[in-house]
Amino acid sequence: MTGVTGVVVIGGGYAGVMAANRLTQRDDMTVTLINSRPVFVERIRLHQLVAGLDSSEGFDPSPSVSV
């Protein structure tokens, strides 16, 4: 079988981005990554963002949480 295979990766989390990046290294595939957000959100430090301890690019910490 010859030609180029089109692959669609749904979800731009850690696994989706890793899968898409690895697949782009192949010459016989084109990859489209579909994600609901325009930028990547670092989920590992999400607890810091919610607590107001960090301001990573791509996350809007403006909605405050009242305790």
Image (cartoon, grey):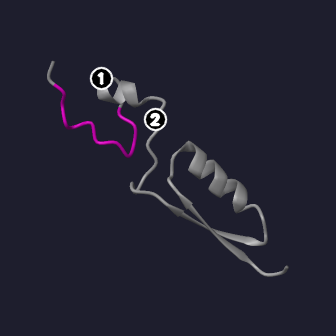
Asked whether 38 or 54 is in front, the reply is: 38
Query: Measuring 40% from the left and 37% from the top, which residue is drawn there?
Result: 56
Q: Residue furthest right?
A: 1
Q: Residue 45 at x, y = what percent?
A: 44, 29
* Above or below, comparing residue 31 to residue 67 in the picture: below
Q: Residue 34 at x, y = what percent?
A: 49, 62
Q: Dot 2 surroundings within 10 Å: few (below 14), some, or many (20 or more)?
A: few
- Name the residue beneath numbered marker 1: 51
* Snapshot quadrant of residue 67: top left
Q: Quadrant of the N terminus?
A: bottom right
Q: Residue furthest front?
A: 1
49 vs 40, left or right, is: left
Residue 9 magenta-highlighted: no
Determine the CA span between mark 2 and mark 1.
13 Å
Q: Residue furthest top?
A: 67
Q: Are marks 2 and 1 in contact (CB under 8 Å)?
A: no
35 vs 53, left or right, is: right
Asked whether 25 or 54 is in front, the reply is: 25
- Name the residue beneath numbered marker 2: 43
Residue 58 magenta-highlighted: yes
Q: Residue 44 at x, y = what percent?
A: 48, 30
* Above or below, comparing residue 55 to residue 3 in the picture: above
Residue range highlighted in magenta:
55-65
Say which element carries label 1. loop
Q: Earlier in the sequence, mark 2 or mark 1?
A: 2
* Snapshot quadrant of residue 22: bottom right
Residue type at mark 1?
A: Ala
Q: Magenta stretch mostly in which secondary structure?
A: loop
Residue type at mark 2?
A: Arg
